[in-house]
């Protein structure tokens, strides 16, 4: 029931927008996302641990596809993330220029529906179908509403992602054939493949997620796409889509090819950390606010991936916890980018300054976001990053050290950006308005979440704990 | 039997209607006749009827493929109402010839005797030589007809020579007899049989447009009238593949034939996809994409698995739906652009006709093999089949080629959803065309949700 509601509420909302084309599209989209959020919260409230199956129907068993939907704690965390993030993404649209809002919001809702599908699927083929399906609405969003050079950048994004997707498809088909056509996650995790096979199969499965995240050196599509995409599109990409990569690793890589993971663990961690440091350094050199945030996201994601591959309870748990925190952070950061752009008409840092004089409340909200971005204690990011460093430390000391340098870099570029935008002498031009009611309605709840979960991370960590320990015991048992 | 008779009678009737200038009733008569044939074929779904002294065996797969071809012809006839509305003369002949060609198709998907295979191929092809030249005052159309005729005749020559050699080795034209002869290990290395089989398959590969027997297809696809191109790439391809499948599953294939099939598959996949990357004319793009799809279909045949017929049928259904719909949209866009066939004529489609653009999107995604479309399920099942029959590297290669496929279809999608830069003619959609486009667009999604199976 819950699974069906989650899939259908946004889907039906999107169809209604497309077919009825109401003059006011955003309130309808907002209502649909809030309704699905209520369903997710209900699922959370009634969740008692373990793995829940909502739906299990035969579909096409002959080729390994079953309609199996459910979730464990980690799945629920990502469902929560999807549910929480989308109302804010839709709300962020109120500040954006209006161009075919019905179609635009319908595409957002389609994306949300498919994302729920990704996190609910308990069958590898079903997972793959939803995983690829999320690409279509985003492709159209970028193609139609993107900025400069959108045609070539969107194509690059599309091809990169599908390159990974097809490798993943090959991996899944291979697993299915080896497993006699049973593609359920539980059955795949119980497989015991020879170590040699696992070594190459690891890349077939991981490549898609490495591109989706992206980690170095598969990030070629990311900064330009983030920069060119419409603000809400960037939010979808950065807050939720890349979490599919983390979730995919957690679901389909770690348990299915444990020997392959162990074999490539160091390689992946080193690549991810290179990306994290590299992203941080490049972010520091940017003169465009949106690009700066894009590179900072690249840096954060590298850390998330390294934490996940640490392969211990701290690392995996911290990475999944931080996935949630990062989504909220990305949302705040890009919202601020949008708010600043609204007021100054540019995202070029060199052309800004002194906004604080005109908009002190916005500056205060920005500062609260910034403290979360640099993982100050008592913020949500601190909890996740602390756990990840503890996990990395257990693998190798200098991994944790490299990871820590990204925090330092992060502090530099985030404060630098804040300084460029808010402080200093004001620029000439029309007086900018202070934070509006809408800005407060979006930013205050998000900041409240980050602070609340920074002080009291229990509820979210509890979700992650059980499944992670179970995963680890499965890895070490044979 | 009754379906064949019915179709022949309707074909002749159409010619008479043309004689008395009853243009309005042509498509209606054709569609009614086809519907009758479909009912007759479907009514005997679980029967197996030998015909003409058992040189035709109308069994489950034969019925399924016949239905698919007849269904595709119905869609094309519905399209024909609008397409032939501007043509002054000889419209009846077009419909009638397509029906005659369809009869050939039905014969080759149900043959159980090699003589019938040859006769069926000829019945299928000869009307097409005329149809390809259907635009009598167009140079390109004439060129297409001539090329198709000359190369088709060569292929028939190969086929006939091959069949004769197979007869020489085995002493029979009957498929079952040859099949049991070929399972005898003593005959595994019979050179005459091997040569005959290779020539026979080469003759058929010509109809499939498998590389290196594909040279006719881009020019013929481009030059023929669009409706005939659609007919060739759906009905003819379905018939040829079903015949190919029927032949190779009935026999114990010598190793050399397996190697030949593998080579054909790899070459076809490679050339079709790589050359399609460079195409900017939509019809040529579809020609090369058709070659590429031949490659994927051949991969399904490689395994020689019992399920391959099923997968073949599914794939061809998905492909037929998407192709018919896209060729209709091409015709409409081409009309609006005064005969231009460059893919940029689709630019602005979404603004002008949102629903047509969405249908085009679904069909292109299906051809590219993106979930949630029938094309994805089809490719997925091909890969599954390829891996379970142990062709690890060929499947991996096919997956890589599928990525190229996604690229060139995405280019077309990009055009359809990009705003138009300068004003052009407006794109008008007749209600009947809209119906067919909708059927095809919804069909590729519906097929992914309700997988069909052969009896």
Image (tube, rainbow, N blue to C red):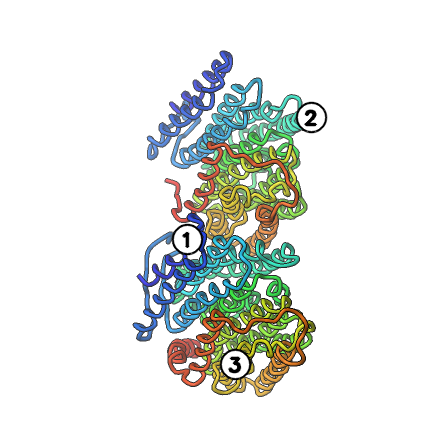
Q: Residues within 10 Å of mark 3 (few under 14, many from 20)?
A: some
Q: Residue under label 1, please give it.
A: A63
The residue shown at (64%, 37%) is B341
- The answer to whether any part of residue B216 appears in the image is no
Q: Position of residue B394 (x, y in %)?
A: 57, 53
Q: Output the chain of dot 3.
A: A
- To the question of a shared chain for discs 3 and 1, the answer is yes
- The relative height of residue A459 versus residue A124 in the rendered view (above or below) is below
Q: Residue under label 2, please give it.
A: B139
- The relative height of residue A161 versus residue B269 in the rendered view (above or below) is below
Q: Residue under label 3, please give it.
A: A368
Q: Output the chain of dot 1.
A: A
Give the Cα separation between the discs numbered 1 and 2: 48 Å
Q: Position of residue B342 (x, y in %)?
A: 65, 40
Numbered disc 3: secondary structure: helix
Left or right relative to B319: residue B33: left
Q: Nearer the viewer, residue B80 or B3?
A: B80
- To the question of a shared chain for discs 1 and 2, the answer is no
Numbered disc 1: secondary structure: helix
- The answer to whether any part of residue A99 appears in the image is yes
* Mark nearer the viewer, 3 or 1: 3
Give the Cα separation between the discs numbered 3 and 1: 51 Å
* Mark nearer the viewer, 1 or 2: 2
Q: Position of residue A365 (x, y in %)?
A: 52, 78
């Amino acid at each position: 029931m819950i699974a069906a509601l989650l899939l259908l509420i946004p889907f039906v909302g999107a169809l209604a927008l497309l077919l009825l084309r109401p003059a006011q599209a955003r309130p309808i989209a907002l209502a649909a996302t809030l309704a699905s959020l209520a369903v997710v919260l209900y699922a959370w409230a009634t969740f008692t641990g373990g793995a829940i199956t909502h739906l299990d129907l035969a579909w096409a068993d002959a080729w390994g596809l079953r309609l199996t939907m459910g979730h464990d704690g980690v799945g629920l965390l990502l469902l929560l993330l999807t549910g929480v993030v989308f109302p804010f993404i839709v709300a962020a649209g109120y500040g954006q220029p209006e161009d075919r809002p019905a179609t635009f919001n319908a595409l957002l809702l389609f994306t949300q529906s498919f994302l729920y599908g990704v996190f609910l699927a308990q069958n590898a083929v079903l997972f793959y179908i939803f995983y690829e399906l999320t690409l279509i609405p985003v492709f159209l969003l970028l193609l139609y509403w993107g900025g400069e050079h959108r045609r070539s950048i969107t194509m690059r994004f599309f091809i990169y992602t599908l390159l990974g997707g097809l490798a993943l498809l090959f991996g899944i088909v291979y697993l299915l054939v080896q497993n006699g056509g049973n593609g359920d996650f539980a059955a795949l995790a119980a497989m015991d493949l020879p170590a040699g096979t696992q070594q190459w199969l690891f890349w077939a499965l991981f490549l898609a997620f490495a591109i989706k995240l992206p980690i170095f050196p598969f990030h070629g599509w990311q900064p330009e796409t983030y920069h060119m995409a419409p603000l809400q599109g960037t939010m979808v990409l950065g807050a939720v889509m890349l979490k599919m990569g983390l979730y995919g690793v957690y679901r389909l890589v770690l348990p299915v090819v444990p020997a392959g993971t162990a074999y490539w663990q160091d390689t992946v961690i080193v690549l991810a950390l290179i990306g994290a440091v590299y992203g941080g350094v490049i972010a520091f050199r940017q003169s465009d606010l949106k690009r700066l945030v894009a590179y900072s996201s690249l840096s954060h994601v590298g850390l998330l991936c390294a934490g996940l591959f640490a392969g211990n309870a701290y690392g995996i748990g911290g990475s999944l916890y931080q996935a949630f925190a990062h989504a909220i952070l990305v949302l705040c950061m890009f919202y601020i980018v949008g708010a600043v752009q609204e007021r100054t008409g540019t995202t070029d840092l060199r052309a800004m300054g002194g906004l604080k004089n005109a908009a002190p409340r916005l500056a205060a909200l920005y500062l609260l976001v910034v403290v979360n971005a640099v993982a100050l204690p008592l913020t949500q990011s601190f909890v996740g990053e602390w756990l990840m460093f503890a996990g990395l430390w257990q693998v190798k000391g200098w991994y944790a050290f490299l990871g820590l340098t990204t925090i330092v870099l992060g502090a530099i570029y985030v404060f630098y950006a804040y300084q460029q935008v808010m402080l200093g002498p004001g620029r000439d031009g029309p007086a900018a308005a202070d934070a509006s009611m809408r800005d407060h309605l979006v930013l205050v709840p998000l900041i409240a979440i980050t602070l609340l979960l920074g002080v009291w991370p229990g509820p979210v960590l509890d979700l992650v704990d059980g499944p992670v320990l179970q995963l680890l015991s499965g890895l070490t048992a044979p | 039997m009754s379906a064949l008779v019915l179709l022949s009678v309707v074909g002749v009737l159409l010619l008479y209607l043309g004689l008395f200038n009853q243009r309005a009733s042509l498509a209606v008569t054709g569609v009614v006749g086809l519907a009758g044939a479909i009912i007759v074929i479907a009514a005997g779904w679980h029967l197996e009827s030998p015909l003409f002294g058992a040189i035709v065996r109308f069994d489950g797969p034969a019925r399924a493929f016949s239905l698919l071809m007849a269904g595709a012809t119905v869609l094309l006839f519905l399209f024909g109402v609008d397409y032939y509305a501007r043509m002054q003369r000889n419209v009846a002949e077009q419909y009638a010839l397509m029906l005659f060609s369809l009869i050939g198709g039905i014969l080759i998907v149900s043959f159980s005797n090699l003589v019938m295979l040859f006769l069926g191929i000829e019945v299928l092809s000869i009307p097409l030589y005329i149809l390809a030249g259907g635009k009598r005052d167009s140079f390109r159309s004439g060129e297409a007809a001539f090329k198709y005729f000359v190369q088709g005749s060569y292929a028939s020559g190969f086929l006939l020579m091959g069949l004769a050699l197979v007869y020489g080795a085995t002493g029979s034209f009957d498929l079952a007899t040859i099949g049991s002869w070929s399972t005898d290990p003593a005959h595994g290395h019979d050179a005459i049989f091997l040569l005959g089989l290779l020539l026979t398959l080469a003759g058929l590969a010509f109809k499939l447009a498998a590389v290196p027997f594909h040279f006719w297809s881009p020019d013929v696809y481009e030059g023929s009238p669009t409706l005939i191109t659609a007919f060739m790439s759906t009905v003819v391809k379905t018939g040829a593949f079903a015949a190919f499948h029927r032949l190779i599953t009935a026999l114990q294939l010598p190793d050399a034939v397996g190697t030949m099939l593998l080579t054909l598959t790899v070459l076809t996949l490679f050339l079709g996809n790589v050359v399609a990357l460079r195409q900017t004319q939509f019809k040529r793009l579809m020609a090369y994409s058709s070659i590429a799809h031949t490659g994927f279909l051949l991969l399904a045949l490689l395994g020689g698995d019992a399920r391959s017929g099923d997968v073949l049928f599914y794939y061809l259904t998905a492909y037929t739906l998407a192709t018919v719909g896209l060729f209709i949209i091409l015709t409409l866009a081409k009309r609006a652009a005064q005969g231009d066939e460059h893919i940029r004529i689709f630019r602005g489609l979404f603004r002008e006709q949102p629903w047509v653009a969405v249908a085009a999107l679904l069909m292109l995604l299906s051809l590219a093999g993106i979930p949630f479309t029938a094309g994805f399920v089809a490719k997925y099942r091909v890969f599954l089949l390829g891996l379970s029959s142990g062709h690890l590297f060929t499947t991996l290669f096919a997956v890589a080629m599928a990525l190229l496929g996604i690229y060139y279809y995405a280019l077309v999608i990009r055009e359809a959803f990009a705003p138009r830069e300068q004003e052009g003619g407006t794109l008008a959609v007749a209600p009947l065309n809209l119906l067919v486009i909708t059927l095809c667009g919804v069909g590729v999604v519906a097929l992914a949700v309700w997988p069909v199976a052969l009896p």
